[in-house]
Image (tube, rainbow, N blue to C red):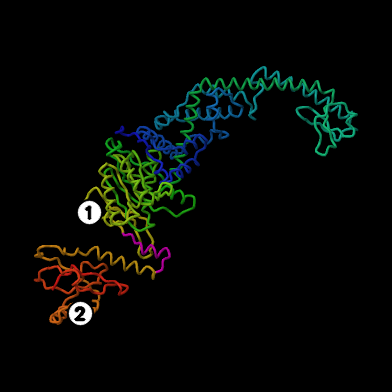
Amino acid sequence: MEAEGTRGADGVLPGKTRADLEWDRLLAALASRCDTPMGRALAIDLSPAETVVEARTALAEAEEAYRSGEHGEPLPIASLTEGRADVREAHARVAHGGVLGPQELLALAAVLGAGRTLRRFLHARREAMPALFARAATDPTLDKLEDAIRESFDEAGTLADHASPELRALRAEHGASRARMISRIEELMRRYAHVLRDSFWTEREGRYVLPVRNDAHERFPGIVHASSSSGATLFVEPRVLVPLGNRLKVLEGDVRREEERIYASLTARVAEHLPSVGAAIEAVAVADLRAASARFARDLRLNFPEKPDHADASVGAAFFADLLGLRHPLLALDHLEGHGPAVVPSDIRVAAGQALIVSGPNAGGKTVALKALGFAAAMLRSGLPIPAKEGSRLGLVEVVLSDVGDDQSLQKSLSTFSAHVVNLAHLLDEARPGALVLLDELAGGTDPREGEALAAAVLDGLCRRGAAVVATTHYEGLKALALGDPRFANASVGFDTTTLMPTFQLAIGVPGASSALAVARRFGIPRWSSSAPRRISAARTARSRTPSAPSTTSAAPSSSPAPRPRTTARRPRPSARSSRTSSPARAPATAARWRKRPRRCSPRCAARATICARPRPASAPRSPTPRGSARRTNCSIRSRARWRSAASWPSS
């Protein structure tokens, strides 16, 4: 068994659970509130902490950022990152011996400046924010590196002349040479105005040229470098300017090499402090993530649960959830963005080794409550506040397992039910103390009686393994588990029978009805097509409550036969066959008894009140009637075409 507080082989949030909860949607909303590319990358890749120590540290940092923002002192991230550039690639290239360009050096200097300001901000509040101060404490020696980079550039982001004496001299000589070039070319424009297409000069292939008419270029001494699209104009470099142009080319190369040398020198200084620079980048990214989580908490009204005592702080058998006003964070986000209605909060309680069985109508919010608990457990382990009210209590979960949705696959030859069974087998293997298991429509998609038995066995196995389980179901047998086993508890989502609308309110301790027919009418199924299912449902309920018929192979009659069920349904008229098998001598007495007492139904009746047996005196012993000689009666609710054998009827 692995060490307590560490994640399993699949992590705290396996891939299927991540997909079932739509965890990536939550991370995208968190990333949109970050100010730096590094913070957004951390938010997108955010996963539950691997160890309990890391989870508690992340929670402490997030809570400090949230409390600081509530007091009007948010972390200084938004105003510190000019350009919002991602410097992680630049840091990696320096590690591999590359040279940074001017934009990358300036972006790196901006991050170093953000780290300096953040360090000073946290140092002044180190007693109130000890976790963030320890995490975002950057190296003070990086301040000189930032100053060196910034001093080498001007306000426009161009390498300044004072970056080096050589660069200053080369740029001065290049400027003087270019001024002489322009002065000379303007003189040539005045001299050869009669052969020029227009009075301007330009550059082609790095050379200074004049626009000469095509029919007059032989009268203008020079080198043709290009022509216009129509061919009527030729761009000619005057021959007298060739030596000046060559000198300019040489000086431009010298200036470029000196600039590259300065870039390499600054990059070398960055490489000398590469570990500290990486730590500063990470500190700024973490601070940005914590500031974003604080904004996320304010937007969605998230809260930090009460801190547990020492016994509850560990994972494993002590995992618990006592959440007040729990909401689904994605639904709350949709409501915040104007895409959905307000979310109805609910209380939920479950602990290790226990199972909460949630029942109620379809489309009533059972799966929403299930996923909301999974979100809360994963968010807390990831260092985020949870969508519950203050006063809630939640332990650190070790792993969140789920079986939600339909995973049928033609390629894997998995039907809906077999896919669920494969998932359930995996959950039983992974379940352990500290695990939270979420099961939606447990053991559905098969025969209800067998599915009910399988579901009960799975819940028992998960509880025996110490997992905390929340399962949604429509099985009546699962709702009855809480009546005799303290490990199980019922919960239900409400349904308003007047409006035929769910209330989405979760009630602990009360099982709920599925209300399938009411939900069907709500979604457009007419009343006339719902009457037959209602009759069949009533008949099935009556049959399930009817005691089994006595065995036809019993050797001795029972001394105290069980009373037969009564019914108020109309007694069917006896058929000709039943009249022939009845004794004429006993017919008057039988008729008299039928007038005095209500008709009794055979326990073997498949649809209530359809097969009627003659009443037997209480003192008459039970004796089986040979098959084939028993009376048959017409048995039907909707037609007279169904016949049933009455081999187990007692004789008179």
Residue 14 image point, x, y percent: 39, 40
Image quadrant where residue 646 sits: bottom left
> In the image, which residues are magenta?
513-526
Q: Please give the residue where the numbered disc 2 appears in the rendered image.
A: 579
Which amino acid type is shown beneath numbered disc 2?
A: Ser
Q: Please give the residue where the numbered disc 1 appears in the rendered image.
A: 483
Quick check: can you spot residue 389? no
Q: Is 651 positioned to the left or the right of 142 in the image? A: left
Q: Is residue 361 above or below residue 458?
A: below
- The front one of 158 and 94 is 94
Image quadrant where residue 557 sits: bottom left
Pair 2/1: label in front: 2
Split into 4 quadrants, where in the image is the N terminus?
Answer: top left
- The front one of 138 and 86 is 86
- Mark 1 secondary-structure assignment: helix
* In magenta segment, residue 524: yes
